[in-house]
Image (cartoon, grey):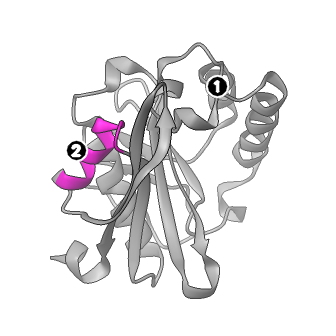
Amino acid sequence: MTSASLTAQPVRLSDGRVVLRDWRPADIPAYRQWLRPEHEWHRTNGPYYGSPSEAEADRLATGQGTVAATDPAERPRPRRSLVVADPGSDALLGVASWYWESQETDWRRMGLVLYDPACWGRGLGTSALRLWTGYLFEQTDTRRLDFATYSGNHGMLAIGRKLGFVEEGRFRKARPWQGVDHDSVVYGVLREEWVQ
């Protein structure tokens, strides 16, 4: 695995299977296209939230476009999101991100989405979340990282188990979707567990 430098350089991490890298202006058209509601990933990644409207998709793409146009030296460390890219073509496959669950206690919650179903079930999500988790632990002093999903997202549940995350919370029947009562599930890992 290639690690990002601690200097103000562009971020590029790779394990040979996927690349996590900074946003570029050339990513924005593909990103905007993947936000369209007909794509399958909307039915697995928090489908109970619904797909973004055209206006919301435009707003999201514009926001990432602003990030992509910013000099990497001016971007925050750690990055709030990185593109998950194909190591051969460098094309956008998905996004790794994080947000504050509680900024007061330095509690960060991660997110990961691979847009193209052709990428699913091939270990690429596991590779991406491994790189993203390592990056966030390297770049911060946080004691823990976690992600939230629902019991219908079998891919994310499998990724958490493969990477040694612990199921820390299960909220039963919290995510009804298409006539099925799914559980909301949180998987977490502590810094000392990850280092081992």
Instruction: For marks 2 and 1, give the one nearer the viewer.
Output: 2
Quadrant in which the C terminus appears? bottom left
Q: Is residue 193 above or below residue 48?
A: below
Percent position (x, y) of residue 39?
54, 17
Left or right of 67: which side holds 13?
A: left
User: What are the residue bounds of the magenta stretch?
Assistant: 151-161
- Magenta includes 157? yes
Task: Confirm or deny contact between disc 2 and disc 1 (CB under 8 A).
Answer: no
Quadrant in which the N terminus appears? bottom left
Q: Is residue 8 above or below residue 80?
A: below
Percent position (x, y) of residue 142?
45, 81
The residue at 26%/53% (across/down) is: 160
Label 2: state its secondary structure: helix
Left or right of 177: which side holds 164?
A: left
Magenta span: predominant SS is helix
Q: Nearer the viewer, residue 41 or 192?
A: 41
Left or right of 81: which side holds 193?
A: left
Q: Is residue 12 above or below residue 16?
A: below
Percent position (x, y) of residue 174?
48, 50
Residue 158 image label:
2
Residue 49 image label:
none
Q: Residues within 10 Å of mark 2 (few under 14, many from 20)?
A: some
Q: Amino acid at mark 2?
A: Ala
Q: Quadrant of residue 49?
A: top right
Q: Amino acid at mark 1?
A: Leu
The residue at 68%/25% (across/down) is: 32
Task: Please tell me which of labels 2 and 1 falls first in the chain.
Answer: 1
Residue indicated by mark 1: 35
Q: Residues within 10 Å of mark 1 (few under 14, many from 20)?
A: many
The residue at 61%/22% (across/down) is: 30
